[in-house]
Image (cartoon, helix red, strand yellow):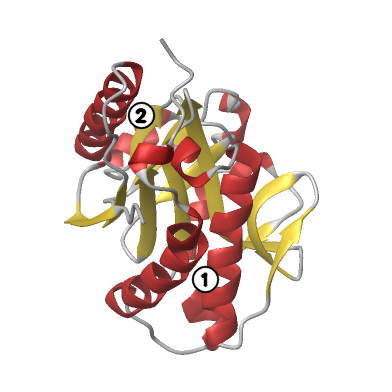
């Protein structure tokens, strides 16, 4: 099995986290091109208040001028992931899997499906019914309130960026944007759905097991992999 290495970055500024995962991503691609073993890594962290726009994100979904947001100590970044616009902040569990999907015999669509499945399984443990919404990645509650956003980038079947699960997130910050570009959908958190407090640390431990379940059993030994890239 090629179990990913788990790393917990704790509360990390978005710019710092981006540079660190980009280094891991670039290194993985270089090693893959050189036909060398790729280290799969799963990163958990939280971010101080920040808004990110994906490569297809629309500035129209940012509802306040960036100058106003900076005054409120909210950073804005335009990044190279899929998806539109989202908010990250304390109380939100962010996951950055840097994975060689070839080692799991899967493509990008199945990769996203498996992340969604792990989140749905986690929520079920708390008696929260998570669902998929046709045409929109992520996990939803009753198809009207998003609880987990997903936005990824891949190159040569290596992934970066990932998911953001609202655990005890202050949902008021989502009023600054049209979350994921939707004007007719809402957002929610595990804390709101449970109507009680819940810690990110508790959720980390449980989600980790569900993610392992989705990926570890499907990995193949390094010696059995094909390397089609030159």
Question: Which residue is labeled 1 in the image?
Answer: 189
At x 49% / y 36%, what residue is drawn? 102
The C terminus lies in which quarter of the figure?
top left
At x 67% / y 63%, what residue is drawn? 140
Is 181 placed above or below 201 here?
above
Question: What is the spatial separation of the Cα atoms under label 1 and label 2, in whole angstroms?
Answer: 28 Å
Q: Answer with mark 1 or mark 2, whichever residue precedes in sequence.
A: 2
Is 120 placed above or below 97 here?
below
Q: Is residue 193 left or right of residue 3?
A: right
| Spot occupied by residue 113 in the image (x, y as percentages of width and height) | 63, 53
Outermost residue, front side:
224
Question: Which residue is labeled 2 in the image?
Answer: 67
| Spot occupied by residue 55 in the image (x, y as percentages of width and height) | 53, 23
Outermost residue, right side:
134
Residue 109, label in figure: none
| Spot occupied by residue 12 in the image (x, y as percentages of width and height) | 20, 49
| Spot occupied by residue 56 in the image (x, y as percentages of width and height) | 60, 24
Given residues 50 and 82, the one toward you in this image is 82
Given residues 67 and 197, the one toward you in this image is 197
- Quadrant of the rendered image containing residue 7: bottom left
The N terminus lies in which quarter of the figure?
bottom left
At x 54% / y 66%, what residue is drawn? 119
At x 21% / y 43%, what residue is drawn? 13
- Circle 1: element type: loop
């Amino acid at each position: 099995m090629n179990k990913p290495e788990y790393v917990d970055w704790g509360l990390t500024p978005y710019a710092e986290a981006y540079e660190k995962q980009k280094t891991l991503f670039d290194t993985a691609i270089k090693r893959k091109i050189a036909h060398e073993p790729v280290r799969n890594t799963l990163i958990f962290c939280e971010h101080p208040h920040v808004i990110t726009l994906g490569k297809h994100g629309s500035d129209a979904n940012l509802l306040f001028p960036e100058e106003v947001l900076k005054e409120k100590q909210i950073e804005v970044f335009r990044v190279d992931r899929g998806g539109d616009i989202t908010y990250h902040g304390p109380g939100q569990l962010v996951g950055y899997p840097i994975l060689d999907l070839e080692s799991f015999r899967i493509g990008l669509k199945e990769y996203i499906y498996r992340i969604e499945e792990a989140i749905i399984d986690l929520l079920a443990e708390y008696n929260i019914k998570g669902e998929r919404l046709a045409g929109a990645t992520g996990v939803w509650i009753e198809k009207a309130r998003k609880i987990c956003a997903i936005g990824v980038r891949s190159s040569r079947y290596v992934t970066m960026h990932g998911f953001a699960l609202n655990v005890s997130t202050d949902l008021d910050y989502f009023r600054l944007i049209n979350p994921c570009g939707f004007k007719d959908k809402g957002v929610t958190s595990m804390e709101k759905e449970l109507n009680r407090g819940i810690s990110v640390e508790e959720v980390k431990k449980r989600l980790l097991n569900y993610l392992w379940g989705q990926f570890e059993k499907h990995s193949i030994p390094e010696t059995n992999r094909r390397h089609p890239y030159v």
